[in-house]
Amino acid sequence: MGERSRNASQDSGGSTGHLLSLLPHPTPGHLHRSGGRSVMWSLTALLLLVPSGGQAATLEKPVLSLHPPWTTIFKGERVTLRCDGYHPPLLELRPISTLWYLGHLLLPSHKKSIEVQTPGVYRCQTRGAPVSDPIHLSVSNDWLILQVPYAAVFEGEPLVVRCRGWYDKVVYKLHYYHDGKAVRYFHSSANYTVPQARASDSGRYQCSGTMRIPVEGAPMFSAKVAVTVQELFPAPVLRVTGQAEARGGVAVRCDTRLHPQKRDTPLQFAFYKYSRPVRRFDWGAEYTVPEPEVEELESYWCEAATATRSVRKRSPWLQLPGRGAVPDSASTTAPVPQAAALAPGNQPLSFRKPPVSRSAAPVTSVPNITSPGLRFPAGRAPTAGPPACAPPTPWEPSAAAAALKPDVDLLLREMRLLKGLLSRVVLELKEPQAFPEHGDTPGPPTSHLAVSPATQATAVVES
């Protein structure tokens, strides 16, 4: 028991020592003049700062802001950085200095606000608090710059981008681009605003335009700047929390989580059964399904939205443990139903489309070759088609080929005869002396045609 008390005293002493470093330290002369009142005040402050659990009060990290609120400036311009932190009132007894960082370099200033013109990543820190979130400052020497806000842009908030000419010169024929596509045109300088930003508005932005220096010239383009729209909250999930004992039924909850920087944003929730709302938007995230409708729990879903409905997201269907989810009617690809009804003949009705067979009708013996050009692996029979549809009569190529063979042979012979006749006519027209006449009665001409091997007959063409 005594050892546990000593450990608790040591823990309390460590926390007290940390807080004591934040309080003013009196000098010996001051102690003599004040009669120990400073020590009493310090001990009283420590007792007020240390909660009953023995843990010292922790400070939140400060908030770093930029004025004007643009992360890109022209060379030679200055902007103001301000470090705002939360401090417990008792810690204000001693002035708390502010530390400034440019990258990993500690800046000499300890003021709450500083003016800078050097590009880089800036952070600040107050005594005893964590380091703030960074701000990246860019300095450009171009004629055109695209300026975007330094603070994160969340879903449903306005997104403003600004195309600025060199030292505020007017930009004419102004175009704004999003991921390489023109999204807006202005006759002269103007900001491009998206009233309610969405995740699809993230990407790389750019602007182009002309300036009269001294006369209007060719269009100039700014550098591309990346913009990311942060998610305010993910899509909710509907879960069963338990039985509602007071009124009966089952209690369900629409769960989601806000971004840490927007945890104070109020959300409203609505609940639906199929497409019918059972409770319209309200502040409560829970709903009790009436007892008669408990069997249809999987037909419920919920929706979360901001008070202005600028951001509105729905959940999937309620999924019970160990059971498949109900297909989403809003989705284009619904899962194939697994359950099958029974037909009058006690045959299961499948929701899957039966495979269409392109093979011959099933036979008792399965040969390796069913027809020329169509082969199946040994030991595997061709799949039959649906029993309701009779397969078409297969074509017998062997019988058809036997029936057409005489006609094909006759056609080949006639083509050969025609070729020989044409060759003879061409030869006579070119060289008439190659065929001399022997009197009035010509002799039997010599055939230049080959003998058909099928009929062993010679076709003769007389001149």
Image (cartoon, grey):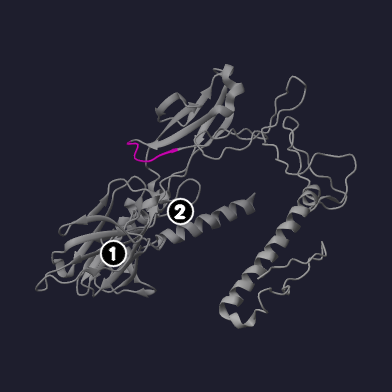
**Relative to residue 438, is residue 52 drawn left or right?**
left
Crowd class of label 2 (few under 14; some 14 to 19; many from 20; radius 10 Å) = some
Indicate whether residue 181 is drawn in magenta.
no
Which of these two is toward me, 441 or 46? 441
Residue 160 in sight: yes
Q: Position of residue 201 (x, y in %)?
A: 36, 52
**Relative to residue 82, is residue 361 drawn left or right?**
right
Indicate whether residue 311 is drawn in magenta.
yes
The image quadrant of residue 111 is: bottom left
- Per the image, label 2 sits on a secondary structure element best described as loop
- Disc 2, disc 1: CB below 8 Å? no
Q: Amino acid at mark 1?
A: Thr
Tell me what residue is drawn at x 63 percent, y 72 percent.
423
The image quadrant of residue 310 is: top left
Q: Residue furthest front?
A: 440
Which contiguous range is marked in magenta? 308-313
- For residue 56, which numbered disc appears in the image? 2
Q: Position of residue 457 (x, y in %)?
A: 80, 64
